[in-house]
């Protein structure tokens, strides 16, 4: 299976990444990607960009050297009511909004609190993608939450970095993917690249999806037309 878009990447703007946007774009082109989503951290992560930075993304072209670019963010969830660290007007302006739980920002709590959090996020129309939710530290009720993601049109990310970078996430990602199959929830496969060598690297995620026979038509970024239609359906910037 070929993935044509890396939907979760970081540059030095994120504070904990080590490559520039140009380096990531060059890597995306070299690896045959047609789309790159630029999804920086916000300043709840130490040294990351303040919310106002994201309006300056208007300077980033829609395409560069044959790679189409989506201007986005990986917003931090601040509490278990689903509050995010970005104002709504900026979220509404961006092409691609991921919401994620990070232990640098919010400590793991109970399964009931994690479930309530994702249910609240599911109702937020400004959130497009659920970030790396296979992390077992933030376990939640898969049936209740996936049903809500289906009803509210959310996309679930299968994050290849989680397989090696978040302890215990290999099985967690598998269970999330199986629940997406059960509830007909679309997914994207991402690298979560924090260094240029990782842009377009999806092996662990793809191996797992192949093992469970995940339907390709639910993988939005396995087909250029499908992914382009997904982006067109998002908010249109002025």
Image (cartoon, helix red, strand yellow):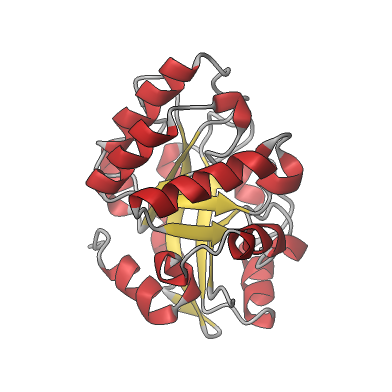
Quadrant (top left/top right/bottom left/bottom right) for the C terminus: bottom left
- Residue 117 screen position, x and y as percent: 38, 25
Return the x and y of residue 25 as percentages of the image width and height.
Answer: 61, 72
State the residue at coordinates (71%, 35%).
168
Q: Which residue, as the protein is rendered here, is positioned at the far top?
A: 110
At x 36% / y 53%, what residue is drawn? 185
Q: Is residue 139 above or below residue 154?
A: above
Query: Horizontal and vertical percent for residue 66?
Result: 52, 85
Q: Total marks drawn?
A: 0
51 or 130: nearer the viewer: 130
Q: Where 171 sits versus 27, above or below?
A: above
- The quarter of the image holding the N terminus is bottom right
Task: Please tell me which residue lies in front, 37 or 230.
Answer: 230
**Quadrant of the image occupied by residue 49:** top right
> As rendered, which of 119 and 67 lies closer to the eye?
119
Say which residue appears at 53% left-offset and 27% top-offset: 139
Asked whether the viewer can see residue 79, the reply is no
Question: Does the rendering let one see residue 4?
Answer: yes
For this view, does 231 lie left or right of residue 17?
left
Rendering quarter of residue 195: bottom right
| In this rendering, position of residue 216 left or right of residue 193 | left
Q: Residue at x 26, y 42 (%)?
A: 89
Q: Where residue 40 sits: x, y (%)? A: 54, 48
Quick check: 88 left or right of 142? Answer: left
């Amino acid at each position: 299976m070929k993935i044509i878009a890396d939907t979760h990447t970081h540059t030095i703007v994120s504070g904990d990444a080590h490559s520039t946007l140009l380096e990531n774009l060059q890597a995306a082109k070299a690896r045959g990607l047609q789309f790159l989503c630029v999804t920086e951290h916000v300043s709840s992560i130490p040294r990351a960009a303040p919310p106002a930075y994201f309006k300056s993304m208007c300077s980033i072209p829609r395409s560069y050297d044959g790679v189409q670019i989506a201007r986005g963010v990986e917003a931090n969830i601040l509490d278990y009511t689903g509050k995010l660290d970005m104002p709504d007007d900026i979220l509404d302006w961006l092409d691609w909004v991921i919401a994620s739980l990070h232990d640098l920002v919010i400590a793991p709590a109970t399964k009931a609190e994690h479930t309530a959090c994702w249910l609240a996020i599911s109702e937020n129309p400004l959130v497009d993608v659920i970030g790396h939710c296979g992390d077992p530290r933030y376990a939640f009720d898969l049936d209740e939450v996936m049903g809500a993601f289906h009803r509210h049109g959310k996309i679930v990310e299968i994050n290849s970095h989680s397989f090696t970078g978040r302890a215990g996430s290999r099985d967690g990602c598998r269970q999330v993917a199986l629940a997406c199959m059960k509830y007909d929830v679309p997914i994207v496969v991402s690298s979560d690249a924090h260094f240029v060598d990782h842009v377009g690297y999806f092996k662990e995620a793809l191996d797992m999806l192949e093992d469970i026979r995940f339907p390709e038509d639910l993988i939005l970024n396995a087909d250029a037309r499908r992914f382009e239609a997904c982006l067109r359906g998002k908010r249109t910037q002025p």
